[in-house]
Image (tube, helix red, strand yellow):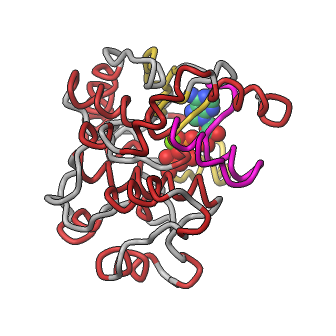
C-alpha cells in the first residue's frame, strides 16, 4: 500500500516516545493507487486531444494538470453561464432563439465528428454555454466517462435523463445518433422551461430509464410552438437510432433553414445582451 500525507487524517495522538509520536490515523482517498494513477494518465491523454479542438461552436480548452490528486482543467470563460442557468432564471427561451441555439449545437457536433471523430456523449442544457457576445458553445465533450460521471453516476434526472433509448437498452457506446436524441430533449427543455420527461412521476432512476426505453417519446405541445419546431424535435426523438437523422441531415430541415436565414440579423447577440444585467458573472 502506498501512503501520502494528504491522504491521511489523524484521529488521535496515541502517545509520544523518545524518538517520535505515535498517532492513530485513517487513510482517506484512493488517489495514490497504481490503478488511480493509470486512470489519471488516461484522462490526461484524452484531455490533450481536446486542446486540438478549435471552433467558434466549442468552448476552448486550454490545458489540464494534476495537482494533489485533482484534475484541474483550464477553459474559456463563458460569462452568461449555462443555458440551464439561463432558463431557470429567466423562464422558457423563445422559439426563435432556440432555433439559433440548435444551429450552434449542430455546427459544434458536426465539427467534433468531422474533424476529430469525437462524439459528445453528454448534450444537455448544463453543457451548453453562452456569452454576452452572442456566442453559444458546447462544453464537456468526449471526456472520459470516469471524469464526467465519476461521482454523479446515480444522480436522478442528471446525465441519465438525456440518454437515448438504445444506450439505456444496450448500454452501447454513444454515436452521433444518440447525441441527436439528447439534442432533441435539450431543445424541448429550453423552450418549455422544464425537463420534458415527467421526472416527478418516476420515483427512481430505474423508472426513468424504463420510461425512456418503453414509453413514446415526449412531444412539444403543438399549440405553443410552430409545426416546423415540433417536426424537428420529433425527428430528433425517433426511438430507432437507425431511423433518426444525423446532425448534418438536421441542418436541412425547415426549422434549421429558418434559423439560418435569421442568423445574420444579430438576433442571438441582442438576446444575450438583454441577459447581461441578470446573468453576467
Ligand atoms: P454534470 O456534472 O452532470 O456535467 P454540470 O454540467 O452542471 O453537470 P459542470 O460541467 O461541472 O457540471 O459545471 C458546473 C457549473 O460550472 C456549470 O453549471 C456552469 O454554471 C459553470 N461552468 C462550467 N464551465 C464553464 C465555463 N466555461 N464558463 C463559465 N461557467 C462554466
Ligand atoms: Mg458540464
Q: Is residue 91 magenta?
A: yes
| Count of numbered tags | 0
Closest to the observer, 186 or 46? 186
- The x and y percentages for residue 189 are 55, 58
Q: Is residue 53 left or right of residue 152?
A: left
Q: Is residue 153 left or right of residue 42?
A: right
Quadrant location, the N terminus: top left
Q: Quadrant of residue 143?
A: top left
- The x and y percentages for residue 203 are 52, 84
68 in relation to 89, above or below: above
Q: Is residue 208 magenta?
A: no
33 in relation to 58, above or below: below
Residue found at x 53% / y 68%: 222
- The x and y percentages for residue 161 are 44, 65
Q: Which residues are magenta?
A: 78-100
Would residue 19 be visible to someone looking at this image? Answer: no
Closest to the observer, 182 or 153? 182
Quadrant location, the C terminus: top right
What type of secondary structure mainly makes up the magenta span? helix
Residue found at x 20% / y 26%: 114
194 in relation to 64, above or below: below
Task: Tell which residue pokes out farthest to the left in this image.
Answer: 242
Residue found at x 48% / y 35%: 259
Residue found at x 28% / y 41%: 247
- The x and y percentages for residue 229 are 47, 54
Amino acid at each position: 500500500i502506498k501512503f501520502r500525507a494528504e491522504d491521511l487524517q489523524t484521529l488521535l495522538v496515541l502517545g509520544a516516545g523518545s524518538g517520535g509520536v505515535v498517532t492513530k490515523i485513517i487513510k482517506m482517498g484512493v488517489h495514490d493507487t497504481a490503478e488511480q494513477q493509470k486512470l489519471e494518465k488516461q484522462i490526461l491523454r484524452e484531455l490533450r486531444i481536446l486542446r486540438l479542438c478549435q471552433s467558434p461552436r466549442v468552448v476552448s480548452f486550454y490545458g489540464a494538470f494534476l495537482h494533489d490528486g485533482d484534475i484541474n482543467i483550464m477553459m474559456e470563460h463563458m460569462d452568461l453561464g449555462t443555458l440551464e442557468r439561463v432558463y431557470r432564471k429567466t423562464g422558457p427561451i423563445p422559439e426563435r432563439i432556440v432555433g439559433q441555439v440548435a444551429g450552434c449545437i449542430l455546427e459544434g457536433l458536426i465539427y467534433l465528428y468531422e474533424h476529430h471523430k469525437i462524439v459528445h456523449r453528454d448534450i444537455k442544457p448544463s453543457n451548453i454555454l453562452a456569452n454576452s457576445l452572442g456566442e453559444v458553445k458546447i462544453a464537456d465533450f468526449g471526456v472520459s466517462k470516469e471524469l464526467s460521471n465519476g461521482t454523479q453516476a446515480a444522480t436522478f434526472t442528471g446525465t441519465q435523463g438525456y440518454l437515448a433509448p438504445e444506450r439505456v437498452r444496450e448500454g452501447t457506446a454513444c454515436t452521433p445518433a444518440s447525441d441527436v436524441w439528447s439534442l432533441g430533449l435539450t431543445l424541448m427543455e429550453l423552450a418549455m422551461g422544464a425537463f420534458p420527461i415527467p421526472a416527478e412521476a418516476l420515483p427512481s432512476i430505474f423508472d426513468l430509464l424504463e420510461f425512456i426505453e418503453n414509453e413514446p417519446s415526449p412531444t412539444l405541445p403543438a399549440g405553443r410552438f410552430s409545426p416546423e419546431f415540433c417536426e424537428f424535435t420529433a425527428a430528433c426523438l425517433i426511438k430507432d437510432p437507425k431511423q433518426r437523422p444525423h446532425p448534418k441531415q438536421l441542418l436541412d430541415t425547415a426549422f434549421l433553414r429558418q434559423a439560418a436565414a435569421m442568423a445574420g440579423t444579430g438576433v442571438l447577440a441582442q438576446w444575450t445582451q438583454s441577459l447581461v444585467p441578470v446573468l453576467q458573472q
